[in-house]
Image: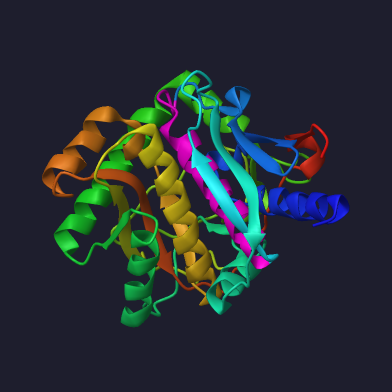
């Protein structure tokens, strides 16, 4: 491959990576290019100091970005040779991805790749249309392909417990002034030109409560921010599901992020949007309660709701130039 072609492929892969979901849209990653290798790093300046003390959510976010790199390279005809946590002495170096041999992308890879810039996080209720059973099975398979487990929560009592835990965590966190300020930092007011954080247009101004109700983050914090799309029509909780891993190491967090993004892109390809709820996962005792009492000893990496909505959502991302260090090729 010509040097120019290799650089074009690498730039396209990083461009895909920045569209990954991340907690509060912090985009907590950076990339460095050395020859035909991309290094994915955790950006410590974008880690949540209070909400993500252990860095779990940051690594899940970066794992989603890694999945996008893999998909983009394969869609562009190159295999991705991935090493996760390649250097114990450099904990911020999460993965390296080297351009491998030529490969022909299969139809599913092309399908997922096409959703990367289309996928949006949802922050409200859904329509009453259920997610088809066959699609749920496909999403479970997508997570398993990356070494994680996606468990649809069918039992109404278990759904109520997860909703109650989310609400309790939200109430406790909202009483913590420093924690609240950290969340507010990532809320974008209307008209903001920032390329990170949660846009005011990405959540409803007057959200309707669903039953059971899963608490949403308060990015507006008393301001009359928010959009109007779907806020009165979409009142269903949707399908509740939990993404888990057997172990709970840094490697598992990165794997969970890759599994999460694979699930999200497959869902997006079939018109399904996803809402995240991480409040209870940010409190050790609540997360441990879920592991012991609800999840058969597995570790929750994401609580989510899935469903249909007419709201397309908005998305903002930093340009590649802000996240990519080019060392030459």
Name which quarter of the figure residue 314 lies in: bottom right
Q: Is residue 45 above or below residue 113?
A: above
Q: Can residue 30 be seen in this snapshot?
A: yes
Q: Residue 305's x, y, as percent?
A: 38, 60
Q: Between residues 279 and 115, which one lies in front from this camera angle?
A: 115
Name which quarter of the figure residue 73 lies in: bottom right
Instruction: Give the side of residue 53 with respect to residue 269, left or right.
Output: left
Residue 20 painted magenta: no
Q: Between residues 100 and 180, which one lies in front from this camera angle?
A: 100
Check the picture and name the quadrant holding the N terminus. bottom right
Q: Find the magenta span and give its range.
A: 51-75
Q: Between residues 26 and 328, which one lies in front from this camera angle?
A: 328
- Dominant secondary structure, magenta: helix
Residue 54 painted magenta: yes
Name which quarter of the figure residue 107 lies in: bottom right
Q: Between residues 132 and 183, which one lies in front from this camera angle?
A: 132
Q: Residue 83's x, y, as percent?
A: 51, 41
Q: Is residue 217 above or below residue 42?
A: below
């Amino acid at each position: 491959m010509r040097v120019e072609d290799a650089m074009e492929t690498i730039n396209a892969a990083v461009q895909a990576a920045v569209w990954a979901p991340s907690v509060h849209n912090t985009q907590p990653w950076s990339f460095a290019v050395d020859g035909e290798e991309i290094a994915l790093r955790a950006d410590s300046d974008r880690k949540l100091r209070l909400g993500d003390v252990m860095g779990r959510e940051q690594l899940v976010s970066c794992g989603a970005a890694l999945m996008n790199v893999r998909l983009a390279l394969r869609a562009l005809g190159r295999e991705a040779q991935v090493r996760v946590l390649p250097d114990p002495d450099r904990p911020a170096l999460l993965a390296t991805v080297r351009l491998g041999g030529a490969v022909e992308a299969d139809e599913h890879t092309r399908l997922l790749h096409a959703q990367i810039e289309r996928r949006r996080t949802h922050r409200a209720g859904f329509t009453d249309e259920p997610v088809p059973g066959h699609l749920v099975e496909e999403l479970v398979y997508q997570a398993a392909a990356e070494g994680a487990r996606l468990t649809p929560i069918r039992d109404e009592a278990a759904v109520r417990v997860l909703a109650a835990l989310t609400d309790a965590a939200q109430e406790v966190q909202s009483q913590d002034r420093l924690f609240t300020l950290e969340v507010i930092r990532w809320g974008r007011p209307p008209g903001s030109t920032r390329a990170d954080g949660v846009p005011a247009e990405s959540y409803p101004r007057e959200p309707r409560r669903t039953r059971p109700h899963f608490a949403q983050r308060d990015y507006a914090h008393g301001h009359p921010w928010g959009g109007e799309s779907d806020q009165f029509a979409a009142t269903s909780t949707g399908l509740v599901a939990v993404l888990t891993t057997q172990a709970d190491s840094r490697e598992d967090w990165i794997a969970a992020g890759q599994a999460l993004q694979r699930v999200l892109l497959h869902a997006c390809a079939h018109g399904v949007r996803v809402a995240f709820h991480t409040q209870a996962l940010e409190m050790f005792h609540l997360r441990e309660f879920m592991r012991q009492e609800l999840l058969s000893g597995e570790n929750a990496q994401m609580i989510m709701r899935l469903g249909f909505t007419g709201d397309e959502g908005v998305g903002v991302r930093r340009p590649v130039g802000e996240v990519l260090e080019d060392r030459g090729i």
